[in-house]
Amino acid sequence: MNILSKSELNSLILKIIERQSLSSSEQEILKTFTPHSNYPFTHNQEPDLYREKISILPLIYPSLKKILQQLNFTESENYLTTIWFFWLPLALELANLYRQKSHPIVIGILGSQGTGKTTITKILSLIWQYLNLSSVAISLDDLYKTYQDRKELLKLDSRLIWRGPPSTHDIKLGLDVLTALKNRQYPVNIPRFDKSLHEGRGDRISGEIVNQADIIIFEGWFVGVKPVEEKVFKNPPPPIITKSDRTFAIDCNRRLKEYLPLWEKLNYLMILNPEDYRYSLKWRQEAEQKMIAQGKTGMNSQEIEEFVFYFWKALHPEIFIKPLIENPQSVNLVVNIDIHHQVNQIIN
């Protein structure tokens, strides 16, 4: 295996972006080099992959760079290697998956806040545009029940103090939308949700009309998560501590059964997996601090902890995400994310 520093690798990728000729040895390095042993997108397995990447990268890069700047990526984060080894080959693989089907495909993305769901959604969509493929993104959040419906839901279950856990979504709406998209029953009204309404409680707003969608991205914090055996709740991890905590976790687990028809619409599932699920608490704190620094309303440290712990009590990552990762039948791709929000390893 060729050993390259990150700067040397970036310089080769920049040559491609600037349409400079690569020597045969430089081409061989890019064809054979992988940043980790577990990187599935290899040119040895897919001989055309290198040629496709060489062809498309100079075309997409100006628009891609604008998106990354809008998302506050900095040059110091060295995203060139992520483009070359992850975003580009993944987009091409999913485009090939679409071409093998006779209908639009649904790509599920499971990830907590800070794992990069928004980033990867925007970048994949951009690359597909250059491949003459249309796409639409739907968040699990877009399927929240209306404000009024959730007020009624809270009367039935006082534990549902925040939107997010199972039963706070309109599953029939999601099924109707995904079915219409897969069957090309255009126009399709894509639901949208505004979290800022009703003092942060949020409500549904006018949808987005879509007349074409070859690839549908369906993302959310528990997209694809399935019920587990209830015996795991006998000795659950914290913050599931009290008897009421365990009861809430068991009830959320049972309610996951209602979501299985939604997950059956998925053609592909990837997990954006923090190397330590507790990173999401730190990332949430950082996000709130940035909001407060900008003069916006944000939660204090105690409120953030209570908020994050609430979701861990509902669907704890150790209980629900780990089994998916360990079962190759359940997931197509696992992307490990480090403390700096960077892709560290890709496993399929």
Image (spheres, rainbow, N blue to C red):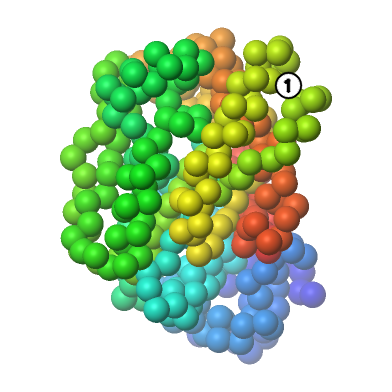
The reply, left or right, for residue 235 in relation to residue 111 is right
Q: Residues within 10 Å of mark 1 (few under 14, many from 20)?
A: few
Closest to the observer, 84 or 267: 267
Closest to the observer, 306 or 21: 306
The reply, left or right, for residue 96 in relation to residue 200 is right
Q: Which quarter of the figure is the C terminus placed in?
A: bottom right
Q: Residue at x 70, y 73 (%)?
A: 33
Q: Which quarter of the figure is the N terminus placed in?
A: bottom right
The residue under label 1 is 238
Vertical position of residue 90 compared to residue 68: above or below? below
Give residue 7's position: percent from left, percent from top.
Answer: 63, 61
The reply, left or right, for residue 272 in relation to residue 192 is right
Q: Is residue 103 visible?
A: yes
Q: Residue at x 53, y 67 (%)?
A: 90
The image quarter in which residue 320 lies: top right
The secondary element bearing badge 1 is classed as loop
